[in-house]
Every structure is written in C-alpha cells, then in structure tokens.
Image: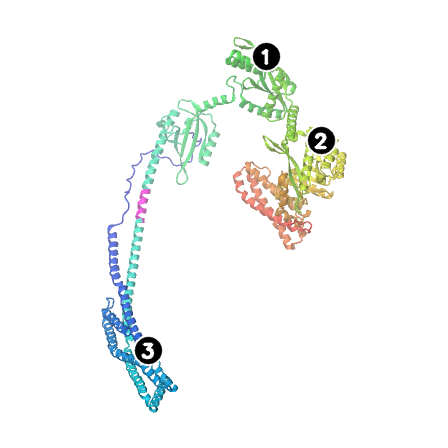
C-alpha cells in the first residue's frame, strides 16, 4: 500500500490495536417456559367450584320421567274410553239396536280397574297437588260405582220389555185371525206397529197408537167374540208401556251420573300439576345455562391469560436466545476474521485515517521482507518503487476518498531493494458518522503471473519452431497493415506461400530434418524482406508475407526476390537441398475486401501458381475469378434444378386498401433446394443477369403463371397474375413471339397476365421499351413499371412509356414510418403519378401503419408482408375468400384525404424517426452527437377542418404544438444525457419520453382526421 503525497486531514480517527476476544457469555436455559404453580391451583379451584354448581343444578333441572307421565295419561284415556263405551252400549240397548247387555258389565269393570290404578299417583305429581288429585279420583270412582249399581234395575225392566214385545205379535195374530174386517185389521196393525223398536217416539205415533186402541175397544164392545183377543192385545200393549217407562227411567238415572265431567276434572288437575313441574324444571335449566356460560367465560379468560403469559415468557426467552446467538455469531465472526487475517495468502495492511500502518499479516512480511515491528506506525510510502509519478498517487487517493476503494496493478520495492509488481486493492473503512477511520489494503505478488503472461504471449503470438508470427499475430498485423495502406495510399501485398515438394524432405530425412529446413527457409525469407515487412508461418510448410510498397511494380520486384530466396540451398541431412515455392498474392486496395478475404484470395491464387507448375507467383484477379466461378456453378446447378422440378412459384397478393378488394397476385420464384430448403430469389438470381439461363428461367415463369391462372379461372377465381421480366429477356429478339405463343397455349388466362418491367431496364432503350409495351397491350397483357425510384426517374421517360401502373419501390416504403426523406420521396412520386393519370401501387407494405400512411397520401394499392407473405398457389384461393382490410385501413378509407395533412404526416414521421434514433443510441450505449429533434412543420390552416367549431380548431392546433414542445423538451434531455455519455440517466428518461411521444402521435392523428372530409359511397370500404 502506498500513502498519499500529502498527509490526510488531522481529524481522522485511528484504528485500535488488536485485543483478545472476551469469553462468550453463558447460554440461557433452553428448558420450555412454565407459568407459576399458584396460578394453576387458583384456576383449578375456581373450575371445580363451577363444576359442582353445574352438577347440582343439572340434578334439579332434570324433569320427571316422561314414561310415568305418559303412563298416567294413557290410563286416564282408558277410563275415558271405558266410560264412553258404557254409555254407548246403554243407549244402543235403549234404542233396540242390540239385545246383549253383557258388554255393560265389561265396560264398568274395566273403568273400575283403571280408576284403581290411577289412584296410585306417579311420583311426578308434587306433594302439594296430590290431595286434590286423590279427591277428584275418588269422586270419579264413586260415580262409576253408582253407574254399575244401576245396572240390575235396567236389566230387569229391559228383560221384561223384551219378553212383552216378544208376545205382542202372537196376540195381534190371534186378533187378525178372529175377524175379517179390514178396518179392524188395519187398526190392529197400527196398534202393533206403535210398539216396534224405534216407534212411539213422536206425538203423532202415540196419537195414532191411541186411536188404534180406541178403535179396538169399540170393536170389542160391538162384537163380543172379539172381546177376548182385543183385551189380550191391549193388555200386552199396556205392559210394554209400563216396562218401557221403567227402563227409560233407569237409563236416565245412570246418565245423570256425569262421569265425563269428573274424568275431565281429573285430567285438568293433573295437567296443571305437570305444567307447574315443567316450569320449575325450565327455571333450573336457565340457571344451568347461566352457570355453564359463566364457566365457559371463566375458562376462556383463563386460557387467554395463559396464552398471553406463555407468549410473553416465550418472547422474552426467545429474545434472550437471539441475543445470545447473535453474540456468539459475532464472536465466531471475529475469530474467523482474525484467523483469515493471519492465514491469508495475500498481504493485508491496516492503517489509520492518516495512512500509518497499525497492523499487517504474516503474508505481508513474507512478500515485503519487513517484520511487523519494522512497519508498525510507518507509512506505506516507504515501499514506493519510483516507477509511478506523483499524479498517479494523487489520482489513486482521490478515487479512494471519493468512491471508497481502488484496485489495480502497482510496482513497489521490498526490503531488499527488489522492485516487483503487485495486484493491490485499497478500501476505506468508515465509522458510524460516515467518517473515514481506517484503510485496508490487500495485495498479491504477481511476479510469477507476469512471467507466465510473457511466456503465454510468446506462445500465443509466435510459432514455436521458427519464431515467426503465427496466425493470431498475423491477423492483427494484417489489420494494421490494411489500415496503414489505406491511410498512406500505398499498395499492400498479401502473399500466401506453400513450399513445393516439401513432403520428400520429411519422408527421406525425417521430421527433424524437415523442421530444420523450415527454420532455414524462415531465415531466408526474413533476410529477403525489409525489417518492417512481416513473415509468418501459418502451419506445415505454409508461410504468409505482408509488405507495403508505393506501387505494384515495387511489389512485383519484392516477390521475385522472395522466389529467389526460397531457392537458396538448405543444409538438410548432412547435405545440400534446394526447394521452390508457389506464391499467391493479392494487392490491396485493388482487392478491397476484408483482411480475412485477402488471405483467402491469396490462398486461391497460390493454388493457381501450383497449377502452373510452381516456383512462381500468381496475382489474384478478384473480379474475373469470382464471376467466372460463381456464374458457372450457379448456372449449372440452376439448370439442374429446372430439370428436377425444384423450382416453384409462390404468389403474393396485391390489394386495394380503400375498396378492400384483391387486385391480383405477383408470381415470385422459389427454389426448393434439397439441402438448403426453400430459397428466395435473392439467393440464386443475382448471378444470372448476363447468362442465357435468365431468358429460359423467365419463359418458365411466364408459362407456369399462365397455367396457374388458368386453373384458378376454371375454379371460378379470375385473378390477374403479374410476372417480373428481366432485362435480357425483354431485349431478346424473339420475346414477343414467344409471349404470343404462350398466350395461345392458354387462351383462358391470356387476359390475366401482367408483366412488371424494372425501371432501369426500361431506361436502357426507351423507344424499344415503349414499343414492347404497346405490343403487349395489343395482346391484352398489361405492363407496369417495377421498382420505380431506383433509376433516374426521368419525367420524360415516364411520360413516353405507355405503362398505366407504377410500382413504388419498397426501399422507400419500408422506412416510410421513420425516415422523413423517404416520406418526401414517396409523397412526391404519388402526386407525380396521379398528375400523369397513372395508377400507383406501393411495394414493401410491412405493417398496418405503412398502409395507413399510404392511404393518407393517396396511394390505395399495396403489396407486402403487411397484406400477406408470398404463399403457395394452393393457399391463395382460401386467403382471397377470407381477407378483410384491417380496421385502421377501413377508418382511413371512410374519409377523403387532401394535401392539407401532409405537414402533419411529416411531423409524425420526424418524431417517430427521432425517437428511433434515440432508442438505437440507448440500445448500443453510444453517444449521440446531434440529438436535436426537428422543429414542427408549418401546420395547416385549422379552418380546413369542416366538422369542428372555430374554438375546437384552435384548441386542436394548440394541443399539437404543446405536445410537440413536450416531446422536444424530453427529447433534448435524453439527447443531452447521451451527448455527455450518461447512458443510465438517458435510459431512465425514456419511459417519460415514450409516453409524451404517444400523446403527440395521438394529437397528430386527431388533427389529421379533423382535416379529412367524409368519403363518397364509392370510396368507402365494404363491411
């Protein structure tokens, strides 16, 4: 560690010397925490008291057994049923519905037995209610006994009545037999009918019977023969009258004994007693519930108290445990730090705030040679090596005081005067107030690393056998040589050399002799070139030479010297041996390619030198070599692909964005390569512009496009198909003849073919191109100018060419959203084409936003990935059926756009392009030299907005200006941060800038639509 040149401030603290660590405190008791025993006794006693009260209350609250209660009620019901049966049987006998009176005795006996059982009252009846209930039961028993005592009288009268009624028919029969007088017989019958059971109950029946009896007496007086039968009948009737009255009197006497009321009285008294008993039990149940709630509340309170006290005790115990563990961990950490300090392999130095050493570890003593006693209290500046100036130490300490640390390599001097490198890290230690109290330095002796680094560098950059630069160093020197030749405007020769017939040397004399020969060749090459030139060995018997001369003639002279140097005799295997070399050379900047390509070209030229016999050099001709090789190979392979059926056509739709219709499709060739997969035309067509294969390929495309158009037409889809025509095909003498033959072979698709001619092709010979276009029109083939804008775009040429459709090149359309220059060009071309009454279609429409911008500029027709990617022929009909323009295109198609909105479109593209520029700079972490956002273009007159009031127009313009000013302010802040290299600060402001940018785009869009007028019905997009 090295001290600052000047002393630090005097108010810095100092680090105390190391001291012994205190013994750890005793650990707290680890047993579970427990509450006092008195608390448990108090709670238990209270719980026992409450439990005793609950038990006693439960015994009092238990009501009488329901079985005894129900048994008494059932017995009482039995008495009621026996009494009711007795009365019913008595009435039945009285009415004459039955004659058997034994059931009366059975009912009376049953009732007496039930009453006797009832008199043994159940235990549920309280003592206070027992006398009254016993008295009611005794009255009931007396009444029932009185009913039973009246049965003999009833039986006697009832039996006599039955017997008298039995003799009545025979007496009547005797009378009927004694007389033949019909009136008398009728009177006898009426008299007898009056004594039948159920008769004689009303006054009319009694009067009729008396009248009949009087008639019979009169007849007996008038006819003595009838006196005896009449007397007998009347006597029998009087007996029946007398016995019936006696029987009815006995029945009335029994019924006057109201046993039913006495039974109800017994039931009423018993139910009142039971209700009082149940009410008393309910009261005790309420008391039981109250005691249970009290006990539950007390137990809950006791549990909460227990839980709270347990938690408090556990918290206190846990806090003691944590404090003990923290103290133990701190002591262990101090022990560990002390052990690490003493046993660290790197040197460690502790100083006070003034930089004076307060402690060092044993590694410090081992590395520096100083003992601990020799350095305590001294400043580390005593070990300065002198290799660093005062500015180095000033910068080092400034960084330490500002950031708190510094690390890097430094050279120091040990006790024995040896200067050595060390890897040093210095950190500042601050106290609780944020003031520096100490410094700690950790360093390692890296002398062995430096030696290994030097050895590895030698091994990494130089050939181990010859000592020449290897491939790695050669690549670096080649990079510098190319840059130097470009800067000096000199010629750089890149030579690739391979020894001829070197293999016999290895085979005849062994690999050791071969290595010796390579070393001698390397020395001869180094002797032949100048000191600034490079001779490198890339492996085996291959060498690379780099030398720079003022012109190619000087390079040629140098190459001849190299060839001569290779032929110098070599001492191999005890004799002399001569070798030759084949050298391939390429000159930079004539061959202006990347350094790797220069080596590859020199290697190719070296093989040409070997093919010429060796012992010479060959200069690489880049253009001829590449063109001849690539064109020949590609032409041969492409012809093979045509024969094998590997070429296919894909079709990319062209649509009218305003009308929402499909205008046609462009046929695009693809190569279904068996190894590389499906290849786009850019991968195989560029090398065929000057080859006869281009014409054959173009004719094949026209033929296949007509076949496919015919198939679609047969299926009900008449879709125009456009085909690109190359310059060589268009300028062929028999182009129109072959085109006419192709149309004759496919008459159903002859009117569906369109040709697209490149602008550069048509400009080669305007007169011929115009004549060909007219001939195509005569055949019914439409022609359009493709890639418009990539050539001269002459207005005269455009006027003279009769093509009705102009295709705006995709190079302008793809960057339309973010490049204002492309917007200006596209807008100008669209206006120009409209002025010439031509149709324009835009290529490269990659998104909905591209289409929206083109619609607003007046270009309704589009083609590109934003519509559809090129697809196989089989997929196109289904796509045509389902395609609908995006909603944003429909919205734009519903209004008519004028040039009033062009400044707004320009402002939108400028804002988006500037934001993209800032994003690119942030993404790559680069400084931005010109971050100023373009000013807002002159806005159109707000009076052009037909649907807004004057106030709304002015508010809309003011909104656009304000949003633009906000975006410009945020953009300037990000730009200034980028210009200063504050990338993080710039990134932190991006979200705000993006939000403001979105608001600006929204305001511009609102103003654009406000300036637009409604479209006519013919211009609207369907559906």
Circle 3 sits on which residue? 95
Residue 935 vertical position relative to residue 114 in the rendered view, above or below: above
- Asked whether 376 or 942 is in front, the reply is 942
Dot 1 and dot 2 residues touching (CB under 8 Å): no
Q: Is residue 312 magenta?
A: yes
Q: Secondary structure at mark 2?
A: helix
Circle 2 sits on which residue? 728
Q: Secondary structure at mark 3?
A: helix
Q: Is residue 55 left or right of residue 764?
A: left
Q: CA distance from mark 1 to mark 3?
A: 168 Å
Circle 1 sits on which residue? 567
Dot 1 and dot 3 residues touching (CB under 8 Å): no
Q: CA distance from mark 1 to mark 2?
A: 52 Å
Q: Is residue 449 left or right of residue 316?
A: right
Determine which quarter of the picture holds residue 746.
Answer: top right
Q: CA distance from mark 2 to mark 3?
A: 142 Å
């Amino acid at each position: 560690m090295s001290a600052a040149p000047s002393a630090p401030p005097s108010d810095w603290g100092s680090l105390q010397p190391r001291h012994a660590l205190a013994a750890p405190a005793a650990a707290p008791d680890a047993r579970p925490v427990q509450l006092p025993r008195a608390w448990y006794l108090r709670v238990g006693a209270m719980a026992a008291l409450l439990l005793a009260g609950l038990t006693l209350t439960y015994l009092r609250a238990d009501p009488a057994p329901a079985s005894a209660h129900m048994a008494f009620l059932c017995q009482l019901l039995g008495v009621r049923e026996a009494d009711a049966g007795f009365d019913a049987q008595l009435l039945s006998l009285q009415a004459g519905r039955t004659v058997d009176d034994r059931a009366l005795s059975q009912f009376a006996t049953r009732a007496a037995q039930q009453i006797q059982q009832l008199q043994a009252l159940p235990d549920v009846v309280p003592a206070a209610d027992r006398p009254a209930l016993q008295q009611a039961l005794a009255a009931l028993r007396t009444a029932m006994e009185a009913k039973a005592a009246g049965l003999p009288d009833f039986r006697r009268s009832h039996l006599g009545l039955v017997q008298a009624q039995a003799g009545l028919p025979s007496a009547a029969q005797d009378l009927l037999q004694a007389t033949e007088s019909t009136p008398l017989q009728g009177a006898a019958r009426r008299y007898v009918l009056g004594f039948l059971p159920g008769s004689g109950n009303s006054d009319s029946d009694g009067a009729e019977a008396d009248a009949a009896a009087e008639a019979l007496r009169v007849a007996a007086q008038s006819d003595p023969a009838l006196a005896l039968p009449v007397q007998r009948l009347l006597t029998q009737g009087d007996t029946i009258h007398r016995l019936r009255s006696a029987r009815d009197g006995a029945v009335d006497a029994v019924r006057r004994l109201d046993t039913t009321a006495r039974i109800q009285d017994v039931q009423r008294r018993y139910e009142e007693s039971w209700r009082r008993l149940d009410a008393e039990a309910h009261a005790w149940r309420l008391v039981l519930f109250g005691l249970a709630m009290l006990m539950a509340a007390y137990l809950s309170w006791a549990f909460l108290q227990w839980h709270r006290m347990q938690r408090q005790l556990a918290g206190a115990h846990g806090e003691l445990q944590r404090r003990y563990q923290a103290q133990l961990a701190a002591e262990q950490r101090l022990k560990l730090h002390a052990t690490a300090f003493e046993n660290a392999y790197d040197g460690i130095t502790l100083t006070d705030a003034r930089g004076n050493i307060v402690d060092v570890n044993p590694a410090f003593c081992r590395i520096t040679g100083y003992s601990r006693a020799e350095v305590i209290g001294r400043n580390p500046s005593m070990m300065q090596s002198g290799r660093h100036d005062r500015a180095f130490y000033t910068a080092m300490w400034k960084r330490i005081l500002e950031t708190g640390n510094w690390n890097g390599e430094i050279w120091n001097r040990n006790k024995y005067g040896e200067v050595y490198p060390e890897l040093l890290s210095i950190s500042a230690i601050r106290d609780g107030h944020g003031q520096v109290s100490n410094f700690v330095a950790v360093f390692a002796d890296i002398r062995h690393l430096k030696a290994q680094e030097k050895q590895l560098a030698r091994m990494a950059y130089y050939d181990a056998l010859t000592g020449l630069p290897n491939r790695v160093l050669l690549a670096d020197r080649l990079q510098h040589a190319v840059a130097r030749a470009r800067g000096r405007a000199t010629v750089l020769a890149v030579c690739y050399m391979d020894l001829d017939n070197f293999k016999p040397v290895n085979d005849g004399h062994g690999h050791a002799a071969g290595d010796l020969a390579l070393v001698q060749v390397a020395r001869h090459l180094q002797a032949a070139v100048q000191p600034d030139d490079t001779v490198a060995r890339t492996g085996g018997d291959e060498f690379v030479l780099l030398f720079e001369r003022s012109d190619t003639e000087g390079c040629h002279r140098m190459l001849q010297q190299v060839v001569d140097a290779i032929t110098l005799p070599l001492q191999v295997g005890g004799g002399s041996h001569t070798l030759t070399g084949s050298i391939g050379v390429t000159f930079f900047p004539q061959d202006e390619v990347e350094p790797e390509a220069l080596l590859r070209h020199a290697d190719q030229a070296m093989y040409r030198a070997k093919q010429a016999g060796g012992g010479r050099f060959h200069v690489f001709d880049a253009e001829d070599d590449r063109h001849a090789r690539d064109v020949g190979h590609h032409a041969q392979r492409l012809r093979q692909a045509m024969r094998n059926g590997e070429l296919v056509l894909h079709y990319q739709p062209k649509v009218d964005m305003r009308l929402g219709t499909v205008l046609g499709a462009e046929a695009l060739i693809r190569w279904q390569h068996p190894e590389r997969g499906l290849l786009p035309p850019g991968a195989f067509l560029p090398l065929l512009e000057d080859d006869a294969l281009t014409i054959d390929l173009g004719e094949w495309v026209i033929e296949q496009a007509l076949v496919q158009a015919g198939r679609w037409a047969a299926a009900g889809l008449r879709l125009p198909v456009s085909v690109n025509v190359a310059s060589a095909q268009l300028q062929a003498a028999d182009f129109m003849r072959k085109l006419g033959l192709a149309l004759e072979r496919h008459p159903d698709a002859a009117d569906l073919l369109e040709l697209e001619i490149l602008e550069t092709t048509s400009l080669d010979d305007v007169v011929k191109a115009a004549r060909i276009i007219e001939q195509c029109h005569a055949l019914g083939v439409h022609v359009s100018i493709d890639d418009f804008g990539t050539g001269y775009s002459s207005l005269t040429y455009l006027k003279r060419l009769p093509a009705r459709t102009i295709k705006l090149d995709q190079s302008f359309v793809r960057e339309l959203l973010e490049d204002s220059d492309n917007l200006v060009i596209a807008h100008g071309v669209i206006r120009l084409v409209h002025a010439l009454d031509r149709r324009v279609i835009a290529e490269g429409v990659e998104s909905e936003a591209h289409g929206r911008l083109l619609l607003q500029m007046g270009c309704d027709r589009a083609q590109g990935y934003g519509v559809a990617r090129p697809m196989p022929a089989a997929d196109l009909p289904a796509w045509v059926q389902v395609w609908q323009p995006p909603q944003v295109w429909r919205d734009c198609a519903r209004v008519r756009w004028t040039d009033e909105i062009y400044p707004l479109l320009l402002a939108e593209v400028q804002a988006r392009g500037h934001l993209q520029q800032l994003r690119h700079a942030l993404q790559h972490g680069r400084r931005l030299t010109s971050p100023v956002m373009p000013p807002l273009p002159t806005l159109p007159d707000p009076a052009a907005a037909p649907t807004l009031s004057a106030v709304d127009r002015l508010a809309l313009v003011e909104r656009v200006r304000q949003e633009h000013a906000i975006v410009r302010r945020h953009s300037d802040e990000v730009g200034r941060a980028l210009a200063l290299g504050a990338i993080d600060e710039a990134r932190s402001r991006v979200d705000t800038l993006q939000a403001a940018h979105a608001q600006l785009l929204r305001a511009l869009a609102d103003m654009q639509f406000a300036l637009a007028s409604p479209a006519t019905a013919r211009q609207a997009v369907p559906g």
